[in-house]
């Protein structure tokens, strides 16, 4: 991998992330909206802290207090310094735990205790589904964990995942909105889901999704359990003003601008990618070899079917290693595949930057790419090959992004190499 190629992709990554940063995204919206009165913040998700800081930038003393529920490591130091009345909950992701239930209880308590004269400002981003939960009557935490483990390993699209999650919850599927009657509420969302559907982001706490059948692949025992639960469909709720403040297309637009500023052509996939990470990786590899543009870019979210005991890795690392297999021995090209929140699956790595020599570097360390992929342990191979991408939390979450330097663009750059965990 040339140092120039690595640096270019990291520069583009940085430009794209800046365009969807939760803090300026929320600040810009609220400065235009000019909300009146006093507001209580409820922020849930991986970008919750950044979004809360954006609300503070715009509203200042109009903020009464803030409930912030987020993941370990996603809390900047300035959050506590900026807000005097802060109730901060660090909960579990991607699997709910007892802290998630405590956060869910605090969420309901905050909503119910809000007077009719004060407003509720919800700031919701990806990860909210596991970070805050109030189980349906009779559902235990052990059942929540077991069902979510199956869902995460299933490779199902998010709509079918949420059809199951909603039946296990008192706040998902629009049911939280039932507690907003008589209260004014605004919800600002960062989208990491197909079609930017508010009923899907964070499992749709404030918006009921269309009725959906349970997945056909759902194990019989779980189907029987879910169908036996009391009817928990969303009832009429309070009116909520909802706006999407950052989405994948905003990131892609920033990538176009950054590429053009460098006098480089870029080909952006016209639709968001979805589905099996293996298929998406092969498409990216074909484009890297065949596109006449200098760069390619795409956004979306892939899925990986996990074995019974997966190793270290995430869907972006898996995609990157599959692409590296397809690129091996060919023209020199480079691909970045990463989660825009700065994490990938249960790991602290964002993803990876791979090239035509990734497999050779991993083999020198005694590892086999096919074996790693079969065990869902792409991260172990990519650590050995020196291709992991470590960015830290980014303050946003608009899904996953691919940025590639094609064969047509590669000849402009000097050759070199970079080993170890890559950092922007």
Image (cartoon, rainbow, N blue to C red):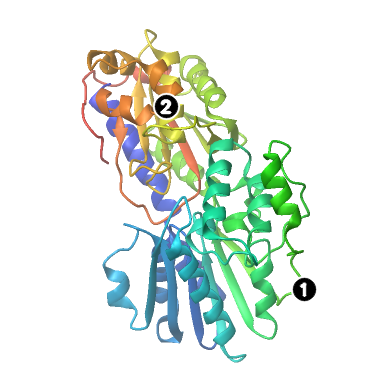
Q: Is residue 100 above or below residue 313?
A: below
What is the quadrant of residue 153 in the picture?
A: top right
Q: Earlier in the sequence, mark 2 or mark 1?
A: 1
Q: Position of residue 185 (x, y in %)?
A: 61, 77
Q: Is residue 225 above or below residue 59?
A: above
Q: SS of the residue at dot 2? A: helix
What is the quadrant of residue 113 in the picture?
A: bottom right
Which residue does the numbered mark 1 point to in the structure image? 236
Which labelled disc corresponds to residue 320? 2
Q: Is residue 112 above or below residue 198?
A: below
Kindly indicate whether the residue at mark 1 contacts the one at mark 2 (C-beta within 8 angstroms): no
At x 63% / y 40%, what residue is drawn?
157
Q: Position of residue 212 (x, y in %)?
A: 76, 50
**For this rendering, which residue is in front, 177 or 264?**
177
Q: SS of the residue at dot 1? A: loop
At x 68% / y 40%, what residue is drawn?
218
Q: Position of residue 74 (x, y in %)?
A: 35, 58
Q: Is residue 94 above or below residue 179?
A: above
Q: Quadrant of the N terminus?
A: top left
Question: Cα distance, mark 2 to mark 1?
Answer: 45 Å
Q: Quadrant of the C terminus?
A: top left
> Which one is closest to the eye, mark 2 or mark 1?
1
Is residue 266 visible in the rendered image? The answer is yes
């Amino acid at each position: 991998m040339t140092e120039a190629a690595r640096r270019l992709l990291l520069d583009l990554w940085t430009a794209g992330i800046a365009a969807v940063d939760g803090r300026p995204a929320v600040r810009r919206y609220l400065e235009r909206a000019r909300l009146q009165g006093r507001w209580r913040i409820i922020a849930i998700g991986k970008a919750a802290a950044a979004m809360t800081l954006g609300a503070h930038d715009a509203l200042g003393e109009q903020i009464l207090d803030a409930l912030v529920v987020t993941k370990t490591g996603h809390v900047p130091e300035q959050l506590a310094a900026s807000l005097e009345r802060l109730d901060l909950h660090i909960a579990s992701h991607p699997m709910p735990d007892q802290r998630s239930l405590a956060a869910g209880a605090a969420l309901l308590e905050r909503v119910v205790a809000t007077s009719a004269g004060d407003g509720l400002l919800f700031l919701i981003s990806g990860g909210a589904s596991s970070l805050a939960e109030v189980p349906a009557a009779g559902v235990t935490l052990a059942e929540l964990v077991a069902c979510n483990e199956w869902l995460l390993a299933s490779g199902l699209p998010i709509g079918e995942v949420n059809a199951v999650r909603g039946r296990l919850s008192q706040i998902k599927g629009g049911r939280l909105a039932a507690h907003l009657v008589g209260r004014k509420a605004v919800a600002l969302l960062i989208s990491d889901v197909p079609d930017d559907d508010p009923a899907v982001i964070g499992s749709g706490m404030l918006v009921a999704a269309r009725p959906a059948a349970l997945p056909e692949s759902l194990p019989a025992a779980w189907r029987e359990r879910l169908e036996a639960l009391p009817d928990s469909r969303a009832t009429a709720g309070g009116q909520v003003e909802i706006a999407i403040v950052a989405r994948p297309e905003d990131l892609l637009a920033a990538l176009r601008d950054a590429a053009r500023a460098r006098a480089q052509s870029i080909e952006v996939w016209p639709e968001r990618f979805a589905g099996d990470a293996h298929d998406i990786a092969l498409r990216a590899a074909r484009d890297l070899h065949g596109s006449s543009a200098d760069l390619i870019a795409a956004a979306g979210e892939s899925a990986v079917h996990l074995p019974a005991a997966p190793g270290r890795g995430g869907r972006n690392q898996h995609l990157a290693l599959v692409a590296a297999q397809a690129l091996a021995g060919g023209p020199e090209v480079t691909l970045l595949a990463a989660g825009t929140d700065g994490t990938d699956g249960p790991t602290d790595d964002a993803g990876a930057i791979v090239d035509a020599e990734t497999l050779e570097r991993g083999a020198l360390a005694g590892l086999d790419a096919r074996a790693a992929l079969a065990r869902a342990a792409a991260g172990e191979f990519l650590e050995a090959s020196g291709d992991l991408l470590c960015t830290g939390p980014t303050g946003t979450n608009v899904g996953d992004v691919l940025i590639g330097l094609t064969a047509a663009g590669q000849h402009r750059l000097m050759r070199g190499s970079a080993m170890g965990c890559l950092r922007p």
